[in-house]
Structure formats: structure tokens, C-alpha cells
Image: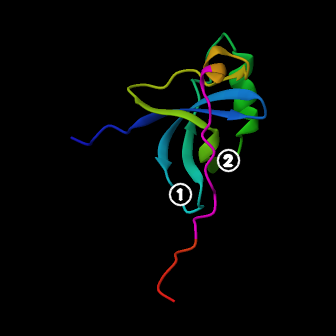
Amino acid sequence: MPEPQRIYKVIFASQGQIYEIFARQISQGGLFGFVEVEEILFGERSKVVVDPSEERLKHEFDGVRRTYLPMHAILRIDEVEKEGAATIREGKSEMAAAVTTIPFPMIPPKKSGPK
């Protein structure tokens, strides 16, 4: 029996808003300081009720095979059992207020060796 595909919920901040998306693949990626997100999932297209924020996300990520998110923008990544609705919220939400990013250098320090 094949192993069920994993689903990840990724919550990140971008341009003053909090994004919550679902994807099948998450990795460190090849770009230093970025998290690679592939196969972004959206709810069924046959729904009668349309969520405007999910429609906005579908439009924003239309044609995107993979996206790279800066590590410092990621608020949380969860492995979940099933996908939910993708959303965009204002950044002044309780989650954004509770999160403080820790500054860290994006360029690794040079190794000092014997002279």
C-alpha cells in the first residue's frame, strides 16, 4: 500500500499580511536562507461559496511551480492530515503580534584558520 502524501500548512508574513497556504513539498532548497515550497494546494474548485482571500491566493500563485520564502518570514510549518482553506489576513492579527523575529546574519561568517 503506497504511503499517503504529506500535506504541510505554511504560515508566513509578507508585505504586512499573514499568509496561510498548504503544500505537498517543503524543503530547505538550494537558495541559502530560503524555504522551498512546491505543489501549493487549494480547495476544490467546485465549491458554491467562494472565499475571496483564497481566490486572491489562487490568482497570486497561478502558474507558480515552486516558491522560495525567506526563512525569517516563516512563522510556522505544520504537517497536517488534510488541507484547509488558504487565507490572507492582516498582519496586525494576534499571531503576528505574538511573534518576534530573531535577527541573524544571512551571510555565513568566514572561517578563520591558522595563519
| Residue 27 placement (x, y as % from top left) | 48, 51
- Mark earlier in primary sequence (2, 1): 1
C-alpha gap between disc 2 and disc 1: 16 Å
Q: Residue at x 53, y 57 (%)?
A: 29
Q: Disc 1 designates what residue?
A: 29
Query: Who is closer to the viewer here, 70 or 51?
Result: 70
Front disc: 2 or 1: 1
What segment is highlighted magenta in the picture?
98-109
Where is 86 relative to 61, above or below? Answer: above
Q: Is residue 97 left or right of residue 16?
A: left
Q: Residue at x 73, y 18 (%)?
A: 92
Give the image quarter of residue 73: top right
| Residue 79 placement (x, y as % from top left) | 41, 32
Q: Which mark is residue 64?
A: 2
The residue lying furthest to the left in this view is 1
Give the image quarter of residue 80: top left
Q: Residue at x 64, y 14 (%)?
A: 94
Q: Amino acid at mark 2?
A: Val
| Residue 68 placement (x, y as % from top left) | 63, 50
Q: In which quadrant is the N terminus drawn?
A: top left
Residue 107 in magenta stretch? yes
The residue lying furthest to the top in this view is 49
Q: Amino acid at mark 1?
A: Gly
| Residue 75 placement (x, y as % from top left) | 57, 33
The residue lying furthest to the bottom in this view is 115
Query: Who is closer to the viewer here, 26 or 70?
Result: 70
